[in-house]
Amino acid sequence: MSQASPSAAGAQRPAQHPLVRVLVELGPLVVFFFANSRWGIFVGTTAFMAAIVASFVASLIIERRVPVMPLVTAVVVLVFGGLTLTLQNELFIKLKPTILYGLFAAVLAFGMATGRNFLQIVLGSVLQVDARGWRILTLRWSMFFVAMAVVNEVVWRNFSTDTWVTFKLFGFLPLTILFSLLQVPLLNRHQIEPAKAEAQQS
């Protein structure tokens, strides 16, 4: 049974401007930072949960499909945020990035071990990269997520809650953007024509 290729599906959706994606992802962090600075971690967590739902809905409207990573992020935030508020224990919201980054790393590693490149499945409609490029990119992102999980553990265990919240906005996001930009040379080296990319994915 034939299925629509990722590139064909991507052609039916309007391209999302990178700035829009950054703003959608940045919004909840800004809300979390502001609410925490004014009213503390529990109000901040409540605001963060509301903002992450709004961010997911915005991604859903913009992309006209269920965006995988924002969905997973929203679920993890709601679960750990809910535990934080229910138990009045800020530990759970602090563990959220560790769990989320660890989950992403594990999924990518599992995919590579079983012959499925989940990064390609998610991004194949917007990036035209050959098979070797996808493998290298997936390995790099998996290692990056592991590193970010470790960084989160170091920060929340050794610094104040306010410092941790600040680092979420001014540390994690800039590091992710910087890491993404550092992958551009790899993408350029392994870029292929859209027709070849479609044949590779079929």
Image (spheres, grey):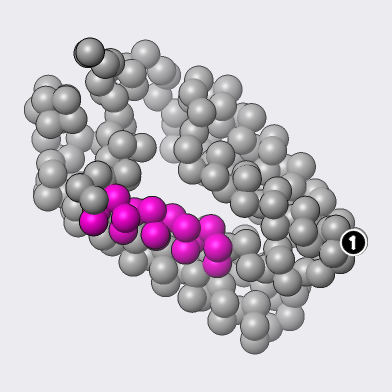
Give SS at disc 1. helix
Give whichever of 142, 1 is nearer the camera.
1
Magenta range is: 98-113
Residue pictured at 64% horizontal, 37% vertical: 55
Q: Is 193 left, or right, of 144 in this rendering?
A: left
Residue type at tag 1: Trp
Give whichever of 177, 78 is nearer the camera.
78
Residue pictured at 70% horizontal, 57% vertical: 80
Q: Residue 19, can we see it?
A: no
* Image location (x, y in percent) of residue 83: 77, 59
* Image location (x, y in percent) of residue 57: 64, 30
Q: Which residue is mark 1?
A: 39
* Image location (x, y in percent) of residue 115: 20, 47
Residue pictured at 62% horizontal, 62% vertical: 96
Vertical relation: 30 (above or below) 199: below
Q: Per the image, is 106 magenta?
A: yes
Q: Residue 17, can we see it?
A: yes
The N terminus is located in which quarter? top left
Q: Is 131 left, or right, of 145 in this rendering?
A: left
Give whichever of 49, 193 is nearer the camera.
49
Give whichever of 124, 178 is nearer the camera.
124
Q: Per the image, is 34 magenta?
A: no
* Image location (x, y in percent) of residue 155: 60, 79
